[in-house]
Amino acid sequence: MNEDSQLRDIITARIAEQGRITFADFMAVCLYEPGLGYYTSPGRKVGAEGDFYTSITVHGAFGRVIAREIAQMWRSMERPAAFTLVECGAGNGRLACDIMDFLSEREPEMYRGLRLVLVEQEPSLESAQREMLAAHVERLAWCSPDEFASGSFTFSGCLYSNELIDALPVHRVVMTSDGLKEVYVASKDGEFVEEADEPSTPEIAAYLTRIAVELHPGQQAEVNLNAPQWLASASRALKNGFILTIDYGYPAAELYTPRRKLGTILCYYRHQIEENPYLRLGLQDITTHVDFTTLMKCGEQTGLQNNWFGEQYRFLLSAGIVEEIEEIERSTVSDEEKLRLRLTLKKLIMPDGGMGETFKVLIQSKGVNAPRLLCQRGIGR
Ligand SMILES: C[S@@+](CC[C@H](N)C(=O)[O-])C[C@H]1O[C@@H](n2cnc3c(N)ncnc32)[C@H](O)[C@@H]1O
């Protein structure tokens, strides 16, 4: 029996037992059912042999530029002797490795007091992370998402994530002539069908009110209640320092524009985009764009300051990607590698068709007096 039919059976049985389920519950099973979900089953997800690319798989220069900014954060905090890095949604540890390599080579003083804590929903990835980060193993620690959310874990330093929030389960809503309805998943004649009815929780309407969004009649959208919850946990864990979030998405006014009538759900299977989340359960990724306004507003409510928000290309250019590529080029002889570097730069920062514009970077902080970040210098300084 393949994963798809096992997951179908699990969801169908759940619906038979408790009635229709929210789309968030459906998505949670598809992505995270132990042993069967997209992220919780074996197999390569990211990169050429997987289903999609992230900036990390494009080139190590991405992580090295983030490391430059993290070193600047450490300077803004007046070079503390101990500094903790936390990565949420660490996957196989590739990004962490690029960051740690840079800091060990270029920031020895900071590296001496550095600790890296990896938080990842899928526990079996720990062995891949151990292997990837073998050179830094004495600095590593792990924290489960449950422990992270419980409030018992605290740190000073920087928490970063790349494409975590787009992978959190979302509720789906639709505006009807009868008001805001939630989209539920039911089962009929062996098929999943959608039903719109009263929202399962008042938090959904409160979410839209907080960002002053009124959907137009017929408009569908997603509401990611897990995102503010995750940020609240992150903010509680942070004693002082920074939270750096990289993901694709928009401010609320742009995300919930009536032009996006069907919302932003997208599925990825072997580099093909698919809009139907009811296919290939557990074999295709299901994602949604991130609402950065909610992260900024909820951050403020939990004591964070918003330091910088903008497109990934602006972040990378002002934090030093050109210098990084030039440095790598100087140490690389082959013309083929030089060309590859140029193409990398293009892919990571191109506003049109590349990863540079839809991808955004948000930096928030707590307890740091007037931080001076590299990205705040602007492009073409
Ligand atoms: C889209 S992948 C991104 C992986 C990696 N950051 C990258 O950019 O290649 C999202 C990752 O977040 C993990 N994840 C999902 N929910 C999480 C949570 N609450 N805490 C930590 N990790 C989580 C998933 O298991 C998955 O490995």
Image: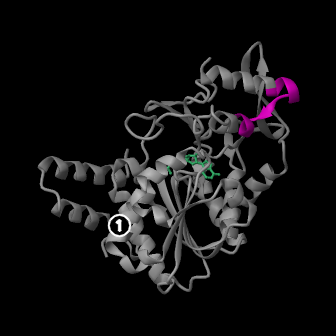
* Label 1 near ligand 1 (CB < 8 Å): no
Q: How many marks?
A: 1
Q: Is residue 243 left or right of residue 105?
A: right
Q: Residues within 10 Å of mark 1 (few under 14, many from 20)?
A: many
Residue 22: x %, y % from top left: 77, 36
Is 45 within the magenta? no
Residue at horizontal 57 percent and vertical 52 percent from the top: 254
**Which corner quadrant holds the C terminus?**
bottom left
Q: Decide if residue 173 is in sight here.
A: no
Question: Could you say whether the residue bearing mark 1 is in a helix, strand or loop?
Answer: helix
Please report the bounds of the magenta region as a residue range: 14-26
Above or below 100: residue 47: above
Residue at horizontal 47 percent and vertical 53 percent from the top: 130
Q: Decide if residue 231 is in sight here.
A: yes
**Which corner quadrant holds the N terminus?**
top right
Residue at horizontal 68 percent and vertical 58 percent from the top: 230
| Amino acid, disc 1 | Phe
User: Is 299 in front, or is 137?
Assistant: 137
Q: Is residue 31 left or right of residue 113?
A: right
Farthest top residue? 189
Which residue corresponds to mark 1?
102
Above or below 187: residue 360: below
Above or below 59: residue 18: above
Residue 210: x %, y % from top left: 74, 60
Residue 312: x %, y % from top left: 43, 59
